[in-house]
Image (tube, rainbow, N blue to C red):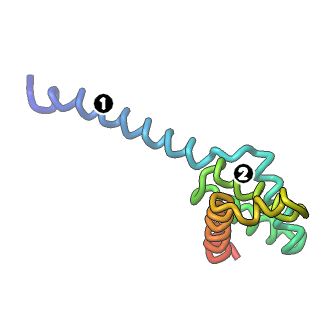
Amino acid sequence: MNRAGRLRPIVAALTALAASVCVARAEEANDYPTAARAEYVYGCMKANGETRSAIEQCSCSIDVVASIIPYERYVTAETALSMSQVRGDLGVQFRTSEQANSAVNDLRRAQAEAEVRCF
């Protein structure tokens, strides 16, 4: 068997491996449900104007955020932000929790990066 004949199965295996890695990365980058993306874009448009340009910028923004932090971390940050507005002991727990503050800081950094890239 010549060299090309021996390399063909190796090249095929490497191609299959590369394709599976690309699919896995695409799934990781797209772990945000459509409803969560739509909610983010809706809120972003309310804050930045309801124009065609705002749709594009806000869509870009959630894509950047999703590429930086996993969805689970995003949910933690959104929950902490929402619950920190509650008065009383329950709200204090979310305002003073190290885990909540860390998640919120991660989200804010991701949003700052999205602002730079998209707006």
Identify whether 81 is placed above or below 16: below
Which of 39 and 77 lies nearest the eye of the viewer? Answer: 77
Residue 16: which quarter of the image?
Answer: top left
Amino acid type shown at disc 1 = Ala
**N-terminal-most mark, 2 or 1:** 1
Please rate how many residues cluster around mark 1, counting C-alpha atoms within 10 Å: few if below 14, some from 14 to 19, many from 20. Answer: few
Left or right of 7 in this view: 35 = right
Q: Quadrant of the N terminus?
A: top left
The residue pinned by badge 2 equals 75
**How far across and down, in percent of the image, does residue 91 sit?**
83, 61
Residue 96: which quarter of the image?
Answer: bottom right
Extreme residue toward the front, this view: 89
Q: Secondary structure at mark 2?
A: helix
Tell which tag, 2 or 1, sits nearer the viewer. 2
Q: Secondary structure at mark 1?
A: helix
State the residue at coordinates (65%, 49%): 71
Q: Is residue 60 visible?
A: no
The residue pinned by badge 1 equals 13
Identify whether 26 is placed above or below 67: above
Dots 2, 1 in contact, CB < 8 A: no
Identify whether 20 is placed above or below 77: above
Which of 2 and 39 lies nearest the eye of the viewer? Answer: 39
